[in-house]
Image: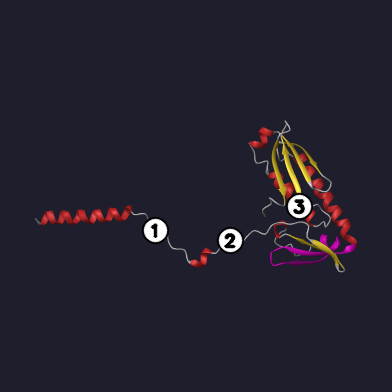
Amino acid sequence: MKRNLCVLVVLAVLMMLCCACSETPTEPEVPADDLRPLPEAIPVVVPIGERTADGVKVTIHGGLLGERGEELSEQQIADGFIDAVRNEDDSVTYTIATDKYDALVARYRADARAAILYTVEDGSYYSLKSIDCAEDLSEITFHVDGNYFRESMDELMVFGNGMIAITAQAYDLDAPGTCVLRVFDENGEQIVERIYPDELVV
């Protein structure tokens, strides 16, 4: 009798253990303080600025700058940058000497366009055959081998060149403020269209 009772007790304990193991573990409670929503992304808008008595002021989105965007380099100072202030939204407002501003933005525009066109010569993107780029950086057209493009990471060239165009435009008060990037295959079929900065997340 005692042996049967012991067997029953052991079976009951084993059943309880099996039931406990089969229960879905409960997720640990997250403290209320950790449920804060992520901050909203600040849209990229270019250009932002004005001509003032103290010089031309332009505000550049933080995502288009490095961490030390408010620290003027020797080259920037030589180019007429007078001051740089980091704003609460992480953007930086630059003051540029009026007498040097127009030449500066013309050079930025030309350098950006040259860098975009150089993407073909660089050879980093195997699908790329040629590029057309508007003088004002408002449009960039990529001509590619469609098969290579679709099977590769070559769309990175769209992002990279879009960043170049929009960053240059950000300093230019007369810039169009947008860049339409299109990719066409060998048959003239449009594969990709991106409009920066509307679709730019930085």
The span from disc 2 to disc 3 (Cα, nearest Å) is: 26 Å
- Asked if residue 78 is among those painted magenta in the image, a careful observer would answer yes
Determine the residue located farthest toward the bottom in the rendered image: 54
**Which residue is located at x 12 percent, y 54 percent?**
4
Label 2 sits on what residue type?
Leu
Image coords of residue 66 (percent x, y)? 71, 59
* Corner quadrant of residue 37: bottom right
The crowding category of the residue bearing disc 3, from other C-alpha atoms within 10 Å (few below 14, some 14 to 19, many at least 20), is: many
Across the whole image, how many numbered discs are drawn on residues?
Answer: 3
Residue drawn at (81%, 47%) of the image: 113
The reply to whether dot 2 and dot 3 touch (C-beta < 8 Å) is no
Going by the numbered disc 3, the residue's amino acid type is Ile
Q: Which residue is mark 1?
A: 26
Is the N terminus in the top left, top right, bottom left or bottom right quadrant?
bottom left
Amino acid type of the residue tagged 1 in the rendering: Thr
Residue lying farthest top? 187
Crowdedness of circle 1 by 10 Å Cα count: few (<14), some, many (20+)? Answer: few
Instruction: Looking at this view, name the residue that lies furthest to the left.
Output: 1
**What are the residue bounds of the magenta stretch?**
75-98
Residue position for label 2: 38
Label 1, secondary structure: give it: loop
Percent of width and height locating residue 101: 87, 60
* N-terminal label among 3 and 1: 1
Where residue 67 sits: x, y (%)?
A: 70, 61
**44 lies left or right of 57:** left
**SS for callout 3:** helix
In the image: residue 28, left or right of residue 11 = right
* For marks 1 and 2 on the same chain, the one whose residue lies earlier in the sequence: 1
Horizontally, residue 51 falls left or right of residue 88, namely right
Instruction: Give the labeled residue for mark 3.
Output: 166
Q: Please tell me whether residue 180 is drawn above or below residue 187 in the rendered image.
A: below
